[in-house]
Amino acid sequence: MDEPLSYKLRPTKLNEIIGQKHLVGQNKVITNLVKNKKLFSMILYGKPGTGKTSMAHAICLELGLKYRQLNAVINTKKDFDIVVEEAKMYKGIILIMDEIHRLNKDKQDLLLPYLESGLITIIGLTTANPYHKINPAIRSRCQIFEFYELTNDDIKNGLQQAIKSEYLKDININKEAIDYIVNVASGDLRAAYNLLEICYYASSDKTITIDIIKEINAKPIFFHDQNEDGHYDVLSAFQKSIRGSDVNAALHYLARLITVGDLDSIYRRLSVCAYEDIGLANPSIGPKVLACIEICEMLGLPEARIPLADIVIELCLSPKSNSGIMAIDLALEDIANGNTGNVPKHLKTTSKEYKYPHNYPNAYVDQQYLPDKIKNRQYYNPKNTSKYEKLLKEIYEKINKRRS
C-alpha cells in the first residue's frame, strides 16, 4: 500500500520541523544536543499532530544512530527482547516508544537496567501528561519536553509545503480552501495532511474546493481524546467557564462535548457545578439540573442540546457560592488531622438527658452538639452572593449568638 502523505512529508532534519521553536532552532535545547552529538533519554509529550514522532526520527537520522520504533501496548515483550539484543550487538540503540505512558511492569523491568547503563536511550512519545501518567521509575530517567499546539500559521506552512511537493501533482486549491482546512485541523498537522490528501483523490480533476472538504469532513477536528488529558481539559474548561459566569465560553465547551456525544460527562459536570459552585446561592438549581438530565435521556441527541444549553446558561448566570464545599472540606480536614473528640454524653443513644428541640418554642433549644475538644469550631462561613444565603446567614448568626 502507498504510504500516507503525512508519512512521506516527515522531516529528516531538525530544521525541517514545523513549530516547536522552543526546542529546535538556533541555540535551542534539542538542536544543541544533536549538534553536540549527545543524547539523553527523553519523553516528548503533547497533542496529536504536533510533531513528536517527526522530531524523534529527525534526531535519530541527524545523529546517524541505530534506532527502532515500538509501541508500548501493541509490541510484545519478545519485541522488546529483540531490541535489547540489538542494543548489545551495536553497543547502543535508540528506542522510539509510542504510548510510553502505557508501558507495563514486565516491559519496564526489562528496560530499566539498560536505560540505567545507557545501552538503550528512549525517546518516549505520548499525548498524556507524563507527570500524571508515566511510572516514576521511567520518568525519573528521562528528560521531559512538552510540545506546544501548532498555530494556524504552522499548519498553513505545512499545507503549502505539501502542495508544492511532488506527491500532489497538478493540485488546484485556492486560499479559501487552504484556510478552511487550517481551521478544521485545530492545530493537528497530521489531520490537515490527511484531509488534504483525501480531498485531492476524491475530486474528479484534482481541484479542491470548500464544498469537497465539507463533504469529507462534516465535523471540526479538535483534540478530544476521551481517555487522555485532552478530554479532561475540555471538561475542566467547561466547569471553570460556568464558575466564572462566562456564558459564551461555557456554551463553546458544551458544544465540543456534544459534538463527541459525551452526555455522561456533561451530566456529571453539571451536577458538580450545581452543588460545588452555586450551592446555597441558588438551591433550586440542583433539582433543575436533575430534571434537565432526565429530559435529555428521554430526548437523546441532537434534541438534548436544547435543554442542555438552557441549563448551562442558567448555571452561568446564577449567583455563586462555594460555602458548602468549603464547610465540609474543613470538617474533613479536622477528621484527617485527628481533631475530633468524644460524642457528648447527652447525644449518645442511651442518654436520657437529650433535649428534643421540637418540645421547645421555635423547635430550638440551647445544647452542645460538638465534642468538647472542638465545641466552638465553625465550618460554615456564609456568603452574601444571594438573598437565600443572606437569609441563612441571619439565622446562623442568630443561633450562634444565642449559644454564645
Image: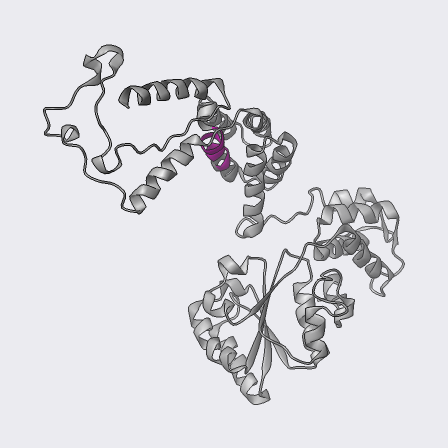
Q: Is residue 233 left or right of residue 219?
A: left
Q: Is residue 163 left or right of residue 397?
A: right
Q: Looking at the image, is 24 positioned above or below residue 303?
A: below
Residue placed most toward the observer, 148 or 340: 340
Locate the C terminus and report the quarter of the image it occupies.
Answer: top left
Q: Which residues are magenta?
A: 269-278
- Give the main secondary structure, helix, strand or loop, of the magenta stretch: helix
Q: Looking at the image, is 33 positioned above or below residue 279?
A: below
Q: Quadrant of residue 308?
A: top right
Q: Quadrant of residue 44?
A: bottom right
Residue 237 shows up from this direction:
yes
Residue 70: x and y, percent?
Answer: 57, 71
Looking at this rendering, what residue extends furthest in the top direction? 361
Q: Is residue 158 left or right of residue 361?
A: right
Q: Quadrant of residue 255?
A: top right
Residue placed most toward the observer, 156 or 162: 156
